[in-house]
Image: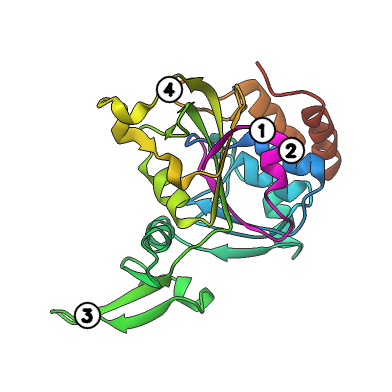
Amino acid sequence: MTRSDANVTLLAEQIKDGARLALPSENSGVPVAVVRALIARGARDLRLVGGPTGGFAIDLLVGAGCVASVEAAGVSLGPRGLAPRFCAAVEAGEIEMIDSTCPATHAGFIAGEKRLPFMAVRGVFGSDMLKNRSDWTVIDNPFPPHDPVVVVPAILPDVTALHAPLADEAGNVWVGNRRELKTMARAAKQVLVTVERIHPGNLVKDSAMAPGLLTAPYIDLIALAPRGAAPTALPPDYGPDDAMLDSYASAAKTREGFDGWLADFLGHDGAA
């Protein structure tokens, strides 16, 4: 049964060193409060999977020394440019970068959700991706026109962690139209969720809200964490904290700047 009386520290404790951890893309419910707790704990050797891309949270974890590898279609700070600590770590050989594409990552999660060994994708031919992904295989389509397709293995995270606008008292989590969050959660062995608020009752009974629910059987722990995605956005609840993200992008260009910014970040609760 889903526990909804947990706190953020307890959620972070479930993510063991070396775990394969899936995190949503920016603006899709990034569990920044959990990321902060992981860094404060001194987590190590995490194998991150972007959903399908990554940004601030992944850069923060990499800079803090928590990461062994990143599998993603890209990691950046969006309009603020490259993710500086991620780029520095890749260039120094401190972490492994496992290149992917958005369709291939989504396909891997879908295969994981359905407990299939792989999923076929197109759009990879003509790129360098096949040279760098020995786990992607080209097979002949068994149906006409019998053309080649690429099959990618299922993505089965140890943990998917996300932040959502609300959960109800029955343990269901509302993610709205972010259907990829449902897929990432259903592919994982364990699902940890922070939310802005708890809704009384059971939203499964609400015909307007039910289609946007990630239902309780897929969720292990829920913690209340107001503004738990800040400084990233959580549509429709709040937008990004542009000033804070600007300050991060500037400071994180150097190791010294990042360390100072991180110390300040760990010293407050992230509330606006």
Residue picked out by circle 3: 147
The numbered dot on residue 236 is: 4
Q: Name the residue type under label 4.
A: Pro
Which badge, 1 or 3, is on the more N-terminal residue?
Answer: 1
Residue picked out by circle 2: 37
Which badge, 2 or 4, is on the more N-terminal residue?
Answer: 2
85 and 166: which is toward the camera: 166
Helix, strand or loop at label 2? It is helix
Residue picked out by circle 1: 33
Give yes or no for residue 23 being in the magenta stretch: yes
Of badges 1 and 4, the one in the foreground is 1
Tell me the crowding category of disc 1: few under 14, some 14 to 19, or many 20 or more residues within 10 angstroms, Cα based: many
Q: Position of residue 174 (x, y in %)?
A: 41, 31
Say which residue appears at 59% left-offset and 37% top-offset: 31
Residue 261 as seen in the image, left or right of residue 118: right
Residue 220: quadrant of the picture:
top right
* 244 vs 129: above or below: above
Give yes or no for residue 210 being in the magenta stretch: no
User: Does the CB distance between marks 2 and 1 fall below 8 Å?
Assistant: yes
Q: Name the residue type under label 3.
A: Asp
Which badge, 4 or 3, is on the more N-terminal residue?
Answer: 3
Say which residue appears at 53% left-offset and 52% top-offset: 50
Tell me the crowding category of disc 3: few under 14, some 14 to 19, or many 20 or more residues within 10 angstroms, Cα based: few
Q: Mark yes or no: residue 177 visible.
A: no
Say which residue appears at 53% left-offset and 64% top-offset: 99
Q: Name the residue type under label 1.
A: Ala
Instruction: Tell me the magenta residue range.
Output: 1-26
Q: Position of residue 66 (x, y in %)?
A: 75, 52
Question: In which quadrant will I find the C terminus?
Answer: top right
Helix, strand or loop at label 3? It is loop
Q: Mark yes or no: residue 224 visible.
A: yes
Q: Position of residue 227 (x, y in %)?
A: 60, 23
